[in-house]
Structure formats: C-alpha cells, structure tokens
Image: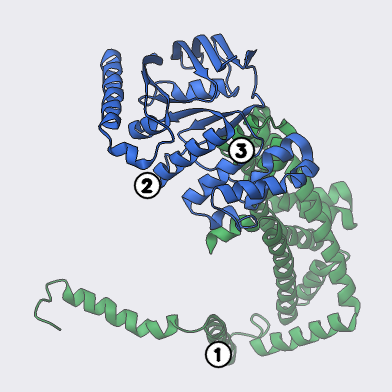
Chain colours: A green, B blue
Amino acid sequence: MNRRSDAAAPARARTTRFAAASAWMDRLPQPVAVSLVVVVVLGLWQALVSFGGVSEIILPSPLSVGEQIVEVVRQLVMGDFLLGQLWITVQEIVLGFLIASLAGFLIGLWIGQTEFGRKAVMPLFVVVEASPKIAFTPVFIAWFGFGISSKFLMAAFMSIFPVIINTAAGMNAAGAEEIRLFRSMRASSWEIFWKLKFPRALPFIFAGLKIAIVSAVTGAVAAEFIGGGVGFGEQVRVAASRIALDRVFALILVLSMLGLALFGLVSLAQRRFAFWDLKKDR
Amino acid sequence: MNTSYSIRGLHKTFDRAGVVALEDVSLDVPRGSIISLIGPSGCGKSTLLSIMAGLLAQSSGTVELFGTPVDGPPHEVGIMFQRATLLPWRSVVENILLPIEIQGGRKAARAARARAAALLEMVGLSGFEDRYPDELSGGMAQRAAICRMLITEPRVLLLDEPFGALDEMTREKMDLEIQRIAAAQEATVVVVTHSIPEAVLLSDTVYAMSARPGRISERIDIDLPRPRGLDVMAEPAFARYTARVRDALDRGHDAAA
C-alpha cells in the first residue's frame, strides 16, 4: 500500500481480493469450466440421493440415470423400437418447422409490407402469441385426430409466431437511403424486394427460425403426450406413468440433444446465408 | 444544346406537414459544369436534388434534363449519398455491378466486370474486388460507391452530401477525385453540401440557399482555374470566395429569421 491511498482504498482492496479469488476460475478453459460445474451439480445430486434421504423413486440417482442413458442410446444405435419412435418425432418436428417457416414467412411478409397487415392481422397474432399456446393441444387432437398430422401441426403452431414477427420486423430493416439508391437505379419493386429487403430481413428471419426449431420440438412432444400412440413424447409419458423417472430423464436428454442438433443445423444455414451479419460480432 | 438541367419555377410543398420545402427555384446547369447547392438544414437542398434525381415529384414547375422532363430516375444520372450504402452481402465488385445487374441482368453484370476492375483501379482499390464492405474503411467504401455510380457511365452525377461522413482530409482528397472524374468523363455534377470550402473547391457555380421557405438566395460563380489542387485553398481568391459564400448564407439566414 502506498501513502496516497485514500478513503476508498479499503473497498477497492476488498473487490480486488474478491477478483483475485475468482480469477483462476475465470481463466479456466471453457470445457474445463463446464465440466467442473457439471461434476459439482452431479455430486450434489448424488449426495442428496445417497445421504439426503430422498427416495430414488422421487429423485433417481445420477448413476441410475446414467445407466438408462446408456440403455436408451444402445437401443437407438441398435435401431430398435425406440429409434422408430424417435424417427416419428423427428418427422413431426421437421415437417411442423417447415410449415411454420413457410407460412410464417408469408404471413410476416403480409404484416411487414402492408399497412392492413400491420393494423389488422398483427394484433390477432399477438393475442394468440400471448396465450399459453400449449393449451391448444387438445384442440389440435380434436381437429386432426390421433395421427401424425395433429402433432406436426401442433409443432407448426408452436413455432410459427417467432417466424412471423421476425420476418415482419426484418422486412422493414432496409434503410431509406438503400431504398432511394435502388429506386435511383430504376429497380422494380420485385428487385427491391429480392435484392434488398429480403437479404436485409434474413438475419431477422434466422433469429426467428432458431427460436422456432426449439419450439417445434416442444409442440411435437406436447402433442404426443396428449395425443398419444406413437413418438418419443409418448415414450416419455409411458415411462413417467410407471414412475421410471431415471428413464424419463434419459429420454428427455435425448430430446434435448435432438433439439440442439436441429438448432445447430439452422445455425449452419444462418452462417451460410446471413454470413455478413454474423461478421459484425467478431 | 449546352444545358443539362433546366429548372423553372419549381415549387415543392410537403402536403402532410404543409411545409413549403422549395419556392420558385429556377436554375440552369451548363453541361460539363460542377455546381453546388449549399445552405442550412431545412433549406430544401436535398429535396431539390431528389427532384432532380426523379425520386420525388415536384408540386409545380418544370425540371428538364437534356430537354426531357424528369418524371422518374433518368438513366443518364448516377447518384451518391452521404453514406456509401454498400450492401454487406455483396462483394465490392458485386456492389459496383449492382446498377448494371438491375438494368441489364446478371449476364450484363458479368460482361461489365472488366469495366468495374478498371474503375476500381482508377480510385485506387485494385485488388479489393472480392472483399466485403465491412473490410473497407469509410473512405474506401465511398470510393467503391463512386465506382458504383460511374459503372453505368452516367453523364450527370448527383452527390448528396457525398463525403459528409468522412474526415476532412479524406473528404478533400475525394473532392479532387470527383473533379478529376468529372473532367475525364465530361460529366455534369451537382453537389449538395454543408461545407463552404468543399463547395468553393469543387464548383463552377455555388447556389446559396435559405430556409423557410427553401429558395435560392444567391448565385456565386467561382472563377478559379482548373484543375484545382488543394494548394488553391491557400490562395487569397479562394478565401474571398469562401467569404462571399458565407456572407450569402448569413444574409439568407437573416432574411429567414
């Protein structure tokens, strides 16, 4: 400590000591840091089950969940029954996502490009968006039956709103000066759309698609819960009904991996088609 | 015929605001000359340029370019704005070829690649063809925008505060570039600017404008020999001209106030 230290010095010294204590954690490489957190959480979880007196029926231990994960993955790799169920769910998600992307884009265009759409159509979607959409699941089952269509339509319903809203916002992303530039080149409205407004909207659209793909997983699984019969969501429900929570956790983990993989695919497409927007973040 | 733009009794009122943006503007722009429109914000200089570019319709009066009334963006005109407005998803050369692509399709754009490369060389951007706009500095981006403006070989260049976003030294260099290009292409140039030295450095004629209503308050002919270099700015004549433009703007301002 030098002589010039003033009244604020003790406080500064405290924050510095705190920073020093956490600095080694901040310096950890991310994979190590993530593993550290996971190990601590799993350790606490295992301790809760082993010594905390929590029943394994209520909270299965990480070890038994791990066993179930191995078992589920084995079945998936062997191409067993479970793989077929997963494939059904994947189809529902992808089909629902594609419908949501296309319909959401068109509706978003309508809202973003016309005053009528903005004034009259948008509020309806906001009302529906503000509702707990998952509550519509029984309606979809009633309308479209217990087959696959109620499920992919539910996936589409869950995921269409972010596409609509982001497309609508994106359609107004082109600057006034850019539009003036295009008009001075005597561009047609189609050219202004295709060469200016659409590319400008792409980063917005991809932001919507990334939310949509995750919501589509939720929609499909929720419809399988209630609509039943087939699919990975149905397997989760069956396992839960026989209180095999370790199995439930393992199946949910597979679903989140699926969601992550699909999200990754959309991100790849974004990197390919809206590369110029991502470069800003570097 | 020696006139490019011929403007008579031009009025522009913005209906929604009821603002008289331009009142009784008349001017002739001799072919091959460089003129500046200078004035405080709200004097309608950019509105006037937009009408000349066919991007905005006048309320009354006539605007003719080479004897033809302007009722949409004329194809002899190249335009440039304060910002380069390069499209970030297109490489530099694709940006420059955009006007060709829009008017003649992709094939025409491919055919014009050599011309784009020659323009890039002229503005000192050789080798930047396949870079993207975010890799360019502000001055480089404006140079690319100049190439885009020139690719269709326009006979008239409309510049709307073209280098307002650049630092002063870069701006002066770009002004000289515009002078050189205008001379080489025998182009007519109309510049909207805030900068008195820029107006004097570039122009054969400076039109000082005043606000509310927007009108031309004074016309100052700049009789300095061409080609002008930056050294001309040190000459007493240059100082006299900038003082005259400043006086004109002050008078216009007082009249409006």
Q: Which residue corresponds to mark 3?
A: B150
Position in image of residue A13 (x %, y %)? 22, 79
**In the rendered structure, which amino acid carries the disc numbered 3?**
Leu
Q: Please indicate whether residue A28 sits to the left or right of residue B108 in the image.
A: left
Q: Give the answer, above or below, for where B211 lies relative to A155.
A: above
Position in image of residue B157 (x %, y %)? 55, 30
Q: Nearer the viewer, residue B83 or B227?
A: B227
Q: What's the distance in space between the residues labelled 3 and 2, CA to CA?
A: 23 Å
Q: Give the answer, above or below, for where A257 lies relative to B146.
A: below
Q: Nearer the viewer, residue B168 or A199?
A: B168
Mark 2, residues whose alpha carbon is within 10 Å: few (<14), some, or many (≥20)? few
**Do tags 3 and 2 sit on the same chain?**
yes
Q: Please indicate whether residue B42 sits to the left or right of residue A179 in the image.
A: left
Q: Nearer the viewer, residue A93 or B175?
A: B175
**In the rendered structure, which amino acid carries the disc numbered 1?**
Ala
Q: Name the chain letter of the residue that bears numbered label 2.
A: B
Q: What's the distance in space between the residues labelled 3 and 1, CA to CA?
A: 74 Å
Q: Which residue corresponds to mark 2?
A: B169
Whether residue B194 can be seen here? no
Q: Name the chain letter of the residue that bears numbered label 1.
A: A
